[in-house]
Amino acid sequence: MNFIEELKWRGMIQDMMPGTEEQFAKGMTSAYIGFDPTADSLHIGSLVQIMILVHLQKAGHKPFALVGGATGMVGDPSGKSAERNLLDDQTLQHNLNGVKKQLEQFLDFNCGANSAEMVNNYDWFKGMSFLEFIRDVGKHITVNYMMAKDSVKSRMETGMSFTEFSYQLVQGYDFYWLWKNKNCTVQLGGSDQWGNIVTGTELIRRKAGGEAFAVTTPLIKKADGTKFGKTEGGNVWLDKTKTSPYKFYQYWINASDEDASKYIRIFTLKTQQEIELLEKQHAEAPHLRLLQKELAKDITTRVHSVEDYEAAVNASEILFKKDEEALIALKALSEEIFNDIFDGVPQAEVGLKEVQSGLSIVDALASKTNFLASNGEARRALKENAISVNKIKVGEEKMLSSEDLIQGKYILIQKGKKNYYLIKTI
């Protein structure tokens, strides 16, 4: 498989230095991507770069994943409007361990000559003095050259510290060190990294008369203009303790048709033929959302597990189930998934003893919770057969009891098809 051709049909190339494709054609080539350890988990924005390394390794080349133990202490100014907080050693080490564990899910670190390798730039910076750095590195790159970079120009009005200004030199030296010590001739990254990457190739040329190459990927944008990888709750993380498998699955299953067609190329390993067939089938029956389902299945299974994927699918289908089938499914949910599904639904707290002794549905809808404006409105809704308790239709005579409690504490009330309310006992 030709690595560059694979990236091209998947829409994963933004910029590429002349000679890069020829470099890969020569045989096994080493290339690296840097990962920022500002958190102990990567998010789905980083998944683009992870997939680049996966394709690199599948094509027979050697991937290096550089975790920025040193650069994480400095802070990359690219795309940032303000100075970042610097991390202490303990936090940084914790984050590095988390990132390494996630990368091991995707890359093979024990497969012979093209095994993936992880490096930490703190290992070569920790013994370097400031004077040594400015003498051996800084003298090769002019201030004019550094000022011309977009990451610097965009901050000229608001200002940036010398620390962040020097970041491109530090990243440039990473590339030089890997080129010199690991025969790594290509740097990969997002298009916002182009300036920093080119500084590295320039440093290799000026300091050692060497030749190095670069490929960047486009920054992903959603069709509706909102930011990729963000929800109302923040980043979509790869760590299930930060973003549950259910919410992770929901992010992909809710993608628009246009976005799903783009994402399935970038985030899955499906072949061009498989994807084009899926798109054809999707176009014939768009209401079945085949693209979104295949996308969500593939990514959720690889990032989490088959079991997490199946649990997410079952949870997603609960809202469409009715009567006893829905009740059984609700009671089978873990509390975590239950809360994920009904996150954002209006809630009210009611005393557990009130429910155990019998609470009328009219009071539960109105005076005890204010879900509905009055007892009269509650009675009208009940007479119209519009109210369900735990997905089962009820009438005015319904008394809530401990038998209605899900996970021993919740009661799900529904008015019509879309209005949900949650009673939580205390």
Image (cartoon, helix red, strand yellow):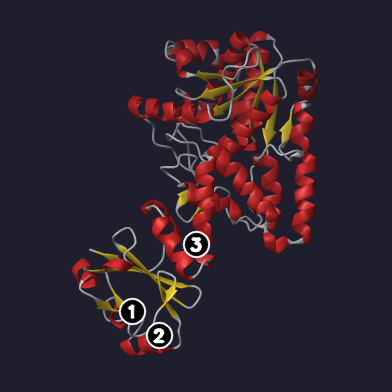
Q: Quadrant of residue 193?
A: top right
Q: CA distance from mark 2 to mark 3?
A: 23 Å
Q: Quadrant of residue 219?
A: top right
Residue at (43, 65) in percent of width and height: 327
Q: Residue 270, relative to residue 372: is it above or below?
A: above
Determine whether, in the image, residue 37 is placed left or right of residue 138. left
Determine whether, in the image, residue 34 is placed left or right of residue 28. left
Residue at (54, 10) in percent of width and height: 136
Look at label 1 and name its amino acid: Leu
Eye-nearest disc, 1 or 3? 3
Q: Please report whichever mark, 2 or 3, sits nearer to the chain's N-terminal start.
A: 3
Q: Quadrant of residue 389?
A: bottom left
Residue at (80, 41) in percent of width and height: 273
| Residue matched to label 3 | 318
Judged from the image, the secondary structure of the residue bearing numbered disc 1 is helix
Residue 354 in picture, x, y percent from top left: 20, 72
Look at label 2 and name its amino acid: Leu
Look at label 3 and name its amino acid: Ile
Eye-nearest disc, 1 or 2? 2
Marks 1/3 in contact by CB < 8 Å: the verdict is no
Residue 46 in picture, x, y percent from top left: 56, 37
Q: Quarter of the image containing the N terminus?
A: top right
| Residue matched to label 1 | 365
Dot 3 crowding, Cα within 10 Å, few <14, some 14–19, many 20+:
some
Q: CA distance from mark 1 to mark 2?
A: 10 Å
Q: Residue 72, relative to residue 369: is it above or below?
A: above
Marks 1/2 in contact by CB < 8 Å: the verdict is yes
Judged from the image, the secondary structure of the residue bearing numbered disc 3 is helix
Residue 225 in picture, x, y percent from top left: 62, 56
| Marker disc for residue 382 | 2
